[in-house]
Amino acid sequence: MGRIIAIANQKGGVGKTTTAINLSACLASLGKKVLSLDLDPQGNMTSGLGVDKDEIENSVYNLIIGECGIEECICKDVIENLDVLPSNINLSAAEIELIGVDDKEYIIKNAMEKVKNKYDFIIIDCPPALSMLTINAMTTANSILVPIQCEYYALEGLSQLIHTINLVQERLNSKLYIEGVVFTMYDARTNLSLQVVENVKENLEQEIYKTIIPRNIRLAEAPSYGMPISMYDPKSSGAESYMMLAEEVIHKGEEKE
Ligand SMILES: Nc1ncnc2c1ncn2[C@@H]1O[C@H](COP(=O)(O)OP(=O)(O)O)[C@@H](O)[C@H]1O
Ligand SMILES: [Mg+2]
């Protein structure tokens, strides 16, 4: 059965979307069938994978308000082995639309039932908030992958995130677990990055991925060409590290089985 991984951290700018895009693409290039589900109204995963977010007919928003079925929203074969369930700014109205709706925590989960068996991996990009969209991601997912930026305030907000994950696990999705944390934007030239990694390792009782994502300008450039790093610059350090992360994610899943 496929694995559903939500990339979550309510802090903005920590590398969620970059990780969601490039982990998706690297898993696909390793032959896994992948669905990239964009739950951020900014739609940056959508555009970063090459889907024009202003031209999409049906997005996650239309799915949430019941205007279309899931199959009508999925952009097929955006990249070999990779489909995209896109979003755009319309999704920012979803929180309001969900007020008073029955089972609003499970709208996405219920919608995914129909298609999830078609994929080896479903990668969900979460918005930078502990909102109803993020809760929907957490009820849909098997596990959460938490990107942590190698900067001074790295641990800030993490206890809130972990508390939220625990609440969801107790009340809404008993199987949910934290897949692990991934360090992003590691800068080998500064002591700070190293200190952050050591500090987090000492203070956070969570699984930590061996792969550390370096700060790499090519990762920041790629989205403006609508390409994941594996296509934009496959020889870059960014591409190599996301490929290693993908292999680690696959391997971890096999260990769990
Ligand atoms: N490893 C990296 N090296 C260089 N720039 C990065 C890296 N990861 C992310 N960025 C850049 O940092 C910014 C924030 O990253 P993003 O993935 O959008 O974070 P989030 O989704 O958590 O808000 C973006 O401009 C992105 O291009
Ligand atoms: Mg983002």
Image (tube, rainbow, N blue to C red):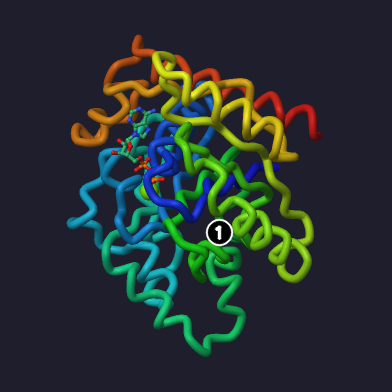
Res. 244 image quadrant: top right
Left/right of residue 39 with respect to residue 116 in the rendered view: left
Residue placed at 59% from the left, 45% from the top?
5
Left/right of residue 175 with respect to residue 208 in the rendered view: right
Residue position marked by numbered label 1 in the rendering: 137
Left/right of residue 157 with respect to residue 40 in the rendered view: right
Q: Quadrant of the N terminus?
A: top right
Q: Position of residue 192 (x, y in %)?
A: 47, 25
Q: Position of residue 42 (x, y in %)?
A: 30, 56
Left/right of residue 122 with respect to residue 86 in the rendered view: right
From the viewer's perspective, is residue 113 above or below residue 99?
above
Q: Quadrant of the C terminus?
A: top right
From the viewer's perspective, is residue 71 above or below residue 152?
below
Q: Amino acid at mark 1?
A: Ala
Query: Which one is nearer the viewer's eye here, 39 or 219?
Result: 219
Count of number-bearing discs: 1
From the viewer's perspective, is residue 18 above or below residue 62?
above
User: Few, some or many C-alpha atoms within 10 Å of disc 1 (few <14, some 14-19, many ≥20)?
Assistant: many
Residue placed at 62% from the left, 47% from the top?
144
Residue placed at 25% from the left, 62% from the top?
57
Res. 189 image quadrant: top left
Res. 223 image quadrant: top left
Q: Position of residue 73 (x, y in %)?
A: 37, 59
Q: Position of residue 206 (x, y in %)?
A: 72, 39
Element under label 1?
helix
Q: Quadrant of ligand 1?
A: top left
